Image (spheres, rainbow, N blue to C red):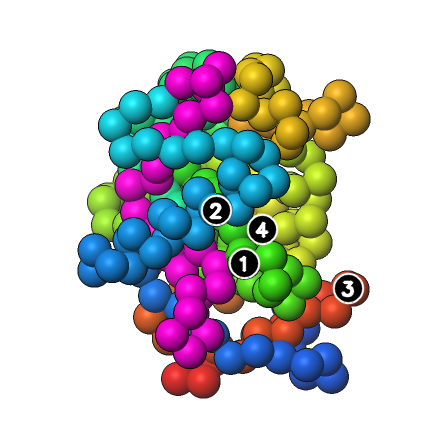
Amino acid sequence: MKFSNLKTGTQKEVISLDFSASTVTIEVKEAIKRSEIIESQYLIAEVYNKYYKIFFSKDYSDLEAKIEPYPHRYIYAKVGDEIVGCAGLYTHNTYVEKYGDVSTEDIINTLLSLNLDPNHYNLEEKREITKIVSKPEWVGKGIGAFIWGAAYSKFFLGNQTEKPPIITCCAKLSTFQYFEKFTGITTHKIKSFPEYKIHEYYRSQRDPMESRLVIPNLDIPNRWYNLKIPSVYNVGKDTNSLKFQSLG
């Protein structure tokens, strides 16, 4: 079988830089200090509890009791002194493996279906983008979509090994469609996500959850994969596009 060549990032670009809409200036950073980590965790817990009645724990999880594990790392957007959006990253023991029944064999089969050689990837090193949230009063301003894109940067993914890690995510279909529309980041279905009580206010029969795979050279535009972090950006969103510009 002939496999596709592996590159870094993809050349596809769908982001408009026409700043006809109003924008917001945000600082984007990884949460390193304990105070930053706690503030990111608090925002995730606040939003998930408000909308989905979900709780979090650092050392315990039970999806039937509606308790999820906190991510291992965080990236956030700040306006002034306020964190207005963030995303998490599982760097091991990922959600799709633990609760989505995704095996290494499933990932290999998905890679093969894309005409990609599994030997080009570090199948033991897995990452999962998760828990993308923005404060309710900041919804609609492009914060969530920008954080989704920034989370797929090589800086946040920590791709420092010779072979790239496996990058996964899980969400409902409408979420994948929304983020693909505004960021251009595409995803590939691994399998449907099993039903749990914890997702009763999140998923539905019309809008089911899936576990998906993301391949940097196929799916992540260079604009996101090579995004400078930490940095400051002007961000704006209208009904059809996300706009952002680095302020250095």
Tell me which label, 3 or 1, sits earlier in the chain. 1
* Magenta stretch holds residue 83: yes
* Count of numbered marks: 4
Tell whether label 4 touches label 3 (CB within 8 Å). Answer: no
Coordinates of residue 82 in the picture (x, y in percent): 42, 69
Asked if residue 52 is positioned above or below residue 14 in the image, the reply reads above
Residue that carries the numbered disc 1 in the rendered image: 135
Tell me which label, 2 or 3, sits earlier in the chain. 2
Asked if residue 20 is positioned above or below residue 31 in the image, the reply reads below
Helix, strand or loop under label 1: loop
Q: Which residues are magenta?
A: 62-87
Residue that carries the numbered disc 4 in the rendered image: 185
Which mark is in front, 3 or 4?
3
Would residue 39 be visible to someone looking at this image?
A: yes
Report whether 168 appears left or right of 35: right
Would residue 217 be visible to someone looking at this image?
A: no
Residue that carries the numbered disc 3 in the rendered image: 240
User: Looking at the image, which residue is at 44% across and 32% down?
Assistant: 55
